[in-house]
Image (cartoon, helix red, strand yellow):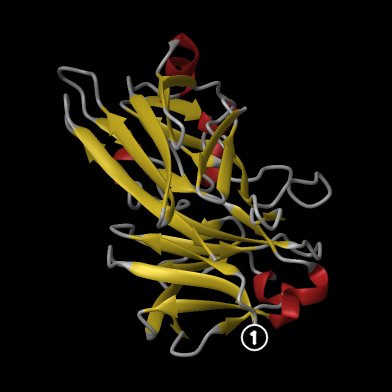
Amino acid sequence: MIKIEFNNYQATISELGAQLTSLMNLATKFEYLWQGAPQYWHYQAPILFPFVGRLKDDQYKYQGQTFQQTQHGFAREKEFTVINQTDNMVEFELNSSRETLNVYPFKFRLNVTYLLDEQGLHVNYQVTNPSDQEPLLFALGAHPGFNVANSQFNQTKVTVKPNKQYQQIPLVGPYNDSGNPRRLDLQQPLKLSHDLFSHDAIILALNNQPVELTLAQENSKRGLTVKIEGAPFVGIWSPYPQQAPLVCIEPWWGIADRLDADQQLDHKMAIKHLPAGDTWHAGFSIQPF
């Protein structure tokens, strides 16, 4: 486990999956991040790569071959290497290998940087295509879970800025039904309930606009804000039907397959096509208060 600190805050990150495992206020000993429990959800903040969500029938096709891949890809199960570290920053790296090439026929380099400063915890991603010829097709997402006690679940709300109506992409089973979008009025805060997640995640189409999602109890001075720039989607999720004491706010640069997906990776909704030799950057921040 790697620990970084700034002022009263400490973040802990595991080399397994480069997963954030703690975000704590050292002065109050308050833990913002979900601590994991298998009866609900044993992950805490996995990195979703090279896919976000479920592939149709857990497979995809590329250049005449069929590949098997489970939900959210493989990065969350891989050991990352620490390549740079200071008191308040750490950078991890994962490279393609013979093992990954068996299920994902692309060379890649994935770098994840965590930085704590006066504005909170910054999480930055960098995907590099080391090939000198082939494009790199991928998606990436964040899946941080935050503590919300069941006794306070119905008194917790998510405030989205800009306050407006958003396009909501429904899920039918594990697949997206973007052909039948809904409108979700978020001019007022979204009040949480466990039944809100009876159809899985609430997915908002952001169209790459900057947004802020603040998770806090009513009349509370403690909570957190997730700030996102340049992401096409954000998911809000809590396990159902379990009454789990957590809520995830998930910036996504990708999405699960459409209901009518033909499984051809080139056609996949929101898949990134990174040219040979290029690097892609993205990120978000968590500002606790």
Task: Report the residue at 62% width, 71% height from top.
Answer: 222
In this orientation, which residue lies closer to the viewer: 26 or 105? 26
From this view, report whether residue 265 is shown above or below residue 158: above
How many other residues sit within 10 Å of disc 1, few (<14), some (14-19) or many (≥20)? few
In this orientation, which residue lies closer to the viewer: 184 or 286? 286
In this orientation, which residue lies closer to the viewer: 168 or 231? 231
Tell me if residue 260 can be seen.
no
Residue 31 x/y as whole percent: 68, 54
Task: Report the residue at 52% width, 48% height from top.
Answer: 53
* Residue 31 located left or right of residue 98: right
Residue 152 x/y as whole percent: 77, 75
Image quarter of residue 204? bottom left
Task: Report the residue at 34% width, 22% height from top.
Answer: 106
* Residue 208 located left or right of residue 96: left
Image quarter of residue 135? top left
| Residue linked to disc 1 | 219
